[in-house]
């Protein structure tokens, strides 16, 4: 299928019939998307220039024609989309089944000219990307901007939150990188599509196989679609390969419980890659930021310990015992827009309490050689 989409002159993506004000929304995507294209918004959507988008939104200098033009575009975006946002047209459009299917990633990403078809309306998919970015920019800069249509009580906060968590951002990220010949590795694709996102597949192992056509390291990993073996075997072999050949020990944080009932025999260390896995407490943009630590080294190589009986369900890795975790804080989503100041104060107090407890510790886990062992592990 990947070769078909890559060779196509144009790909039409059928989203379904017209309903829930989708005609009006498609016209809004078209109108604002066209204006954004004429402004040259695409030229700002790269790591070097992305920061300028917020700067233009906050610009106060009347002589800055680019900033004035961009702020006019933001105002037009609010004018057009505020009623659609309030009426839940965006929410219902993004909830269409198409956006939660794992196999759509190939038809969405591989052809440069991809068109959304909804009812009788058509738009280039990139117009949605532009309009969503403009909406997110407005929401992120509301303290500086005068966008009354988006302020409570005129606009419920949950409507704004839906723009921030819409499902196309990760799809567009994969599409953009493919078009620039900078595809993600398989591990990153798995993380993008199954962590805090509803992504479905009729056959569970397709959560792996559907991504191979886009994975930059597919050949290196040597994973081949296999519908003869069990799903447990496919998931286990994939996890082992990612750890052994890519050094992705951080994959272990996505082995979360309880696992799916139909995968109850999956080894404890193997992720089931179900939808809406919780994100790691340590998450960075690897394309733009450096890791804060390298528990498994800098070269992406881990030392695997073979099980005496070559049991594929048991993973053995050589490592260092650096310290002991005695206590963890209660989990919570500190990015929730509905947090009030009392919860923030409580959260900060909890962090302070844990820091104080840590500073009171005087004993070293390895005695006098503790610092030496820590240095070895760095």
Image: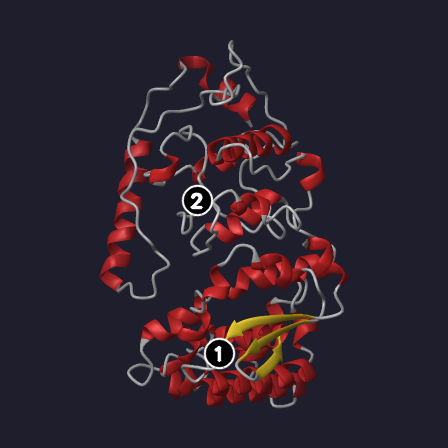
Left or right of residue 322, residue 59 in this image: right
**Front residue of this view, candidates 127 and 7:** 7
Left or right of residue 368, residue 343 in this image: left
Disc number lying in front (2 or 1): 1
Assign the N terminus to one quadrant of the image. bottom right
With respect to residue 102, does 65 lie above or below? below
Residue 259 seen in the figure: no
The answer to which image quadrant residue 300 occupies is top right
- The kind of secondary structure element at disc 1 is loop
**Front residue of this view, candidates 324 and 107:** 107
Q: Point out residue 123 in the picture as x, y percentages from the top left corner.
A: 61, 80
Left or right of residue 101, residue 143 in this image: left
**Badge 2 local density, few (<14 within 10 Å), some, or many (20+)?**
few
Residue 280: give its label. Answer: 2
Q: Residue at x 33, y 54 (%)?
A: 333
Q: Residue at x 53, y 19 (%)?
A: 318
Q: Which residue is mark 1?
A: 17
Q: Point out residue 242 in the picture as x, y percentages from the top left corner.
A: 58, 34
Assign the C terminus to one quadrant of the image. top right
- The kind of secondary structure element at disc 2 is loop
Task: Find the residue positioned furthest to the top.
Answer: 308
Q: Point out residue 260 in the picture as x, y percentages from the top left corner.
A: 36, 41
Q: How far apart are labels 2 and 1 at the CA level? A: 38 Å
């Amino acid at each position: 299928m990947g070769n078909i989409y890559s060779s196509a002159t144009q790909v039409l993506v059928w989203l379904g019939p017209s309903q829930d004000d989708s005609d009006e929304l498609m016209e809004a995507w078209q109108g604002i998307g066209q204006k954004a294209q004429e402004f040259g918004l695409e030229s700002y959507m790269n790591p070097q220039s992305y920061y300028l988008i917020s700067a233009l939104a906050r610009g106060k200098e009347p002589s800055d024609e680019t900033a004035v033009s961009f702020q006019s575009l933001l105002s037009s975006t609010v004018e057009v989309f505020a009623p659609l946002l309030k009426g839940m047209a965006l929410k219902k459009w993004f909830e269409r089944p198409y956006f939660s299917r794992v196999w759509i990633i190939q038809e969405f990403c591989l052809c440069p000219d991809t068109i959304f078809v909804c009812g009788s309306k058509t738009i280039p998919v990139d117009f949605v990307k532009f309009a969503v970015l403009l909406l997110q920019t407005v929401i992120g800069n509301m303290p500086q901007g005068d966008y009354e249509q988006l302020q409570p009580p005129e606009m419920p906060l949950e409507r704004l939150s839906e723009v921030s968590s819409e499902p196309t951002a990760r799809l567009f990220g994969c599409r953009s990188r493919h078009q620039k010949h900078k595809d993600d590795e398989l591990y990153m694709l798995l993380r993008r599509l199954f962590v805090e996102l509803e992504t479905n597949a009729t056959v569970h192992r397709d959560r792996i196989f559907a991504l191979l056509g886009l994975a930059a390291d597919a050949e290196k990993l040597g994973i081949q679609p296999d519908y003869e073996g069990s799903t447990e075997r496919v998931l286990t072999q994939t996890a082992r390969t990612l750890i052994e050949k890519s050094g992705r020990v951080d994959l272990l944080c996505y082995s979360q419980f309880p696992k799916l009932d139909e995968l109850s025999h999956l080894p404890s260390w193997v992720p089931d890659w179900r939808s809406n896995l919780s994100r790691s407490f340590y998450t960075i943009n690897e394309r733009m930021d450096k890791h804060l630590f390298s528990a498994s080294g800098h070269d992406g190589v881990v030392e695997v310990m073979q099980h005496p009986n070559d049991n594929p369900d048991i993973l053995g890795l050589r490592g260092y015992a650096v310290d002991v975790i005695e206590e963890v804080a209660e989990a919570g989503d500190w990015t929730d827009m509905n947090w009030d100041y009392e919860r923030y104060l409580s959260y900060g107090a909890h962090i302070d309490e844990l820091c104080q407890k840590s500073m009171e510790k005087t004993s070293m886990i390895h005695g006098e050689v503790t610092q030496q062992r820590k240095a070895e592990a760095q």
